[in-house]
Image: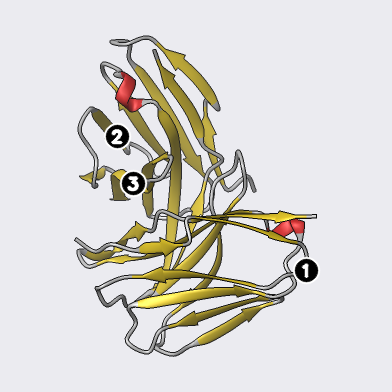
Amino acid sequence: NAGVTQTPKFRVLKTGQSMTLLCAQDMNHEYMYWYRQDPGMGLRLIHYSVGEGTTAKGEVPDGYNVSRLKKQNFLLGLESAAPSQTSVYFCACTVQYGTGRFEQYFGPGTRLTVT
Amino acid sequence: TQLLEQSPQFLSIQEGENLTVYCNSSSVFSSLQWYRQEPGEGPVLLVTVVTGGEVKKLKRLTFQFGDARKDSSLHITAAQPGDTGLYLCAGPSNFGNEKLTFGTGTRLTIIP
């Protein structure tokens, strides 16, 4: 049981290049998320999905796209990378037990540098 | 927009000392969570508090949810180097329980 895994762990891109970050979960959770974490700014939600085939925008969606073709996978794409997208990216999934009761599990993160 | 402010931003203390960190908001939350994040890893859930005034203990860590459900605190007794990390509070967005709002975190360093 690997929980939440992310690929790759590190990546360096040049401005304008594209890439896809892969998140996989083996917990059969419906909800999945992509966050970015920057110094002094905490975790900010990029996009999320409440189920297979559905996606929604979070707090900072510009410059990113996502797809959830399979329940266990959530892909984050950068079509034309910019230095402002240098960050650590975390994927997470959530299980809900009831109103206000849920647990969110995070992957180990992807450190992306755009030069 | 719901905001969660955490204080202090940084805290460095000697092993064995006690400490308290805070998570405050002007908004009411249905619940609040505390996470700990170690370098190079993702956040790990420590606790969820749901009821106003609720106190939960996890070994040497004591979590309290404010009576008005706008704030929370984390108290660590006899801190140990293993407590070092980034502590984040989070609460469900008022747009739906499926999204969380995170605080900016308190970076705690315990000096041996």
The Cα–Cα distance between marks 1 and 3, rounded to whole angstroms, is: 34 Å
- State which mark lies toward you, 1 or 3: 1
Q: Nearer the viewer, residue B68 or A101?
A: B68
Secondary structure beneath label 2: strand
Q: Which residue is mark 3?
A: A44
| Image coordinates for residue A109, horizontal then vertical, percent | 51, 37
Q: Which residue is mark 1?
A: B16
| Image coordinates for residue B29, horizontal then vertical, percent | 31, 75
Res. B63 image quadrant: bottom right
Q: Are marks 2 and 1 in contact (CB under 8 Å)?
A: no
The Cα–Cα distance between marks 2 and 3, rounded to whole angstroms, is: 18 Å
Label placed on residue A75: none
| Image coordinates for residue B58, horizontal then vertical, percent | 66, 76
The Cα–Cα distance between marks 2 and 1, rounded to whole angstroms, is: 48 Å
Q: Amino acid at mark 1?
A: Gly
Secondary structure beneath label 1: loop
Using residue A53 as the reference point, say whether residue B103 is left or right of it: right
**Quadrant where the image shows the C terminus of chain A:** top left
Q: Which residue is mark 2?
A: A67
Q: Residues within 10 Å of mark 3 (few under 14, many from 20)?
A: many
Q: To which chain does the residue with label 2 belong?
A: A
Q: Residue at x 20, y 33 (%)?
A: A62
